[in-house]
Amino acid sequence: MYRIVERYYKMGLFPLEKVKQSVTVKWITVDEYKKITGQDYEPLAE
């Protein structure tokens, strides 16, 4: 799933919030989130 999330983010199909959701549902790891976005992961506010 990492490659899909990365590709969609770079294409503008996944906004930052969707990439965060991808961590929540375990499609990607926190480390992969940082690789994709260049930002540290902060959990979504409920």
Image (spheres, rainbow, N blue to C red):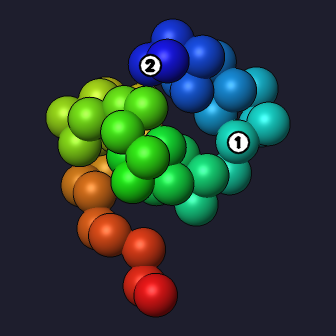
Within 10 Å of disc 2 (Cα), the crowding (few <14, some 14-19, many 20+) is some
Residue 6 place in picture, x, y as percent: 54, 23
Which residue type carries mark 2? Tyr
* Label 2: element kind: helix
Residue, disc 1: 14
Q: Is residue 15 visible?
A: yes
- Where is residue 22? Give x, y as percent: 48, 43
Quarter-wise, where is residue 13 in the image?
Answer: top right
Q: Is residue 29 above or below residue 1?
A: below
Residue at (77, 37) in percent of width and height: 12
Residue shown at 43% from the left, 32% from the top:
27
Q: Which residue is mark 2?
A: 2
Sequence order check, earlier mark of 2 and 1: 2
Using the numbered discs, state the Cα–Cα distance from disc 2 to disc 1 in whole angstroms: 13 Å
Label 1 Cα crowd, 10 Å radius (few <14 / some 14-19 / many 20+): some
Is 15 on the left-hand or right-hand side of 25?
right
